[in-house]
Amino acid sequence: MSSSPDARPASFAMPRPALAGAPDAPAPQAPSPDALGPESLGPDETVDITGERQALHIPALLSELDRDFVGLAPVKDRVREIAALLLVDRLRGRFGLSSARPSLHMCFTGSPGTGKTTLATHMGRLLAELGYLRRGHLVSVTRDDLVGQYVGHTAPKTKEVLKRALGGVLLIDEAYYLYRPDNERDYGQECIEILLQFMEEHRADLVVILAGYADRMNVFFRSNPGMASRIAHHIDFPDFSVAELIRIAELMLDKEQYRLSPAAATAFAEYVELRMSQPRFANARSMRNAIDRLRLRQARRLVTAGGRVSRADLMEISAADVRGSRVFSGGLAAVPGHPGPGHPGPPPTPPAGHRAPPARPDSAAPSA
Amino acid sequence: MRITQGTFSFLPDLTDAEIEAQAQYAVSQGWSIAVEFTDNPHPRNVYWEMWDLPMFDIADGSAALAEAAACRAAYPGHYVRLSAYDASLGRQTTALSFIVGRPAAEPGFRLERQEAGGRQVRYSLHAYASDRPQGERYPAGD
């Protein structure tokens, strides 16, 4: 409300005691970064940064990140830096030093299946816990959700999505599709302009994360320099090594309550190396698909064998299940039109990556 | 005369932080928030103009506050209110409605008496502001 109380004639309204003199002095503002450290400190005092770090559960959050994400060292480094910056800003605020809210819009680039979308979902929660975002929910959109179909449709549509994302993270998957250089009447440009404006105005309430493949993202930024400069954090997701992929697969199997027999583990290591050299390899997503097919083959083996099965039988994946893969017999190249791992184009990423969805109990137990 | 319609109307004007907190409460209850405006202060004027569409799927109160601020900026010298609609079965009505913007000067109402047959007197309220055409009722820029 902008009208000051004394400008108004006497009315039925109760006076606001705190506002008697100063109209908008220390009125309860929106939660600021230093909301958790209310007591301000004098210039000569010191503060225990380790203790503050513990109080904000930062070590717990970061170790959770380490646990859930295999590899991705540069990404984790950047997250650690951001966490440290937010902590230092909070402490600076308590000393009365200026602590402008850093802009945390990000761009995730990397090959398919390197965990971009998955990290984005984590990021929201992380930033909320660190007190940067109020909600930390994730709104995941693609071009379809932002760009309208006719003149005048784009602006309301984009604004609607942005409003929904306020207080959380807006993840724009395959962001380069927003801009179509071949069609100058494309409404994507309008959408980008609204996005840019909103990103500036609501820097405090919203974190925009653009995700996509590196080469196309570069083209996108080259044609939209305004976008590139407003995004402070360009994070590149490296491809996984063989060991990391195996570790990811183990984590996924573990979550679905399967395990590899020792022979199967050896076979799986060979499988991963072979699969990496074959076309349409999509890192963790390929592991996900490989595991789904392992489960198929295991189920078929158990059902064909008949007889009685134990709990351990239902959990164990044998070497034969792994060796049954086409990858060992020449791979996808030998099978034209194979709908297998790594879709030909950039796939409409579900929260893929290497966090397994909850185990589906029905598919795990072919009844004996 | 300050008009008192809706919740909190006898309280001092809410600050933006308070508006946001109320909006956040409405969102947390699953109510959808709409921003409405009018420059007809009559108490029986219940259907106000809608500013944009109701916000059905926002997660944070700041979106409602931003819309209210945009509405105040676009319609200075108007009353602006937030209403939260509870769509749950059995309620299906406005759950919370409060004024978040009002003109700087509110001239108030005069009481009109109409002589009817048999010395009967009918009373009605007439807002001074509504003597002027819609859109020019309050000096813009509050």
Image (tube, rainbow, N blue to C red):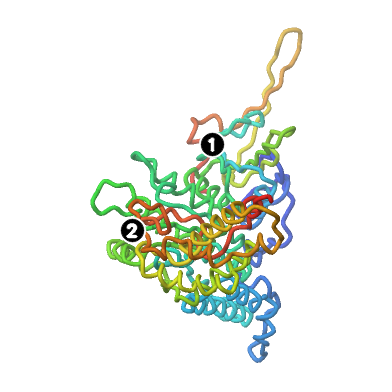
Foreground residue, A272 or A245? A272
Position of residue B53 in the picture relative to residue B7 (left or right) = left
Badge 1: few (under 14), some or many (20 or more) residues near its Cα, within 10 Å?
some
Query: What amino acid does circle 1 point to?
Result: Met
Name the quadrant of the N terminus of chain B: top right
Do the residues at pointers 2 and 1 share their chain? no
- Residue at point 38%, 43% (across, down): A148
The answer to whether residue A233 is seen in the rendering is: no
Chain of the residue displaying label 2: A
Residue A242 drawn above or below residue A316: below
- Residue at point 67%, 87% (across, down): A47
Q: Quadrant of residue A69?
A: bottom right
For mark 2, what is the residue? A334
Residue farthest to the bottom, as pictured: A44
Query: What amino acid does circle 2 point to?
Result: Ala
CA gap, disc 2 and disc 1: 62 Å
Residue farthest to the top, as pictured: B118
Numbered circle sitting on residue B50: 1
Residue B112 drawn above or below residue B30: above
Residue A92 drawn above or below residue A286: below
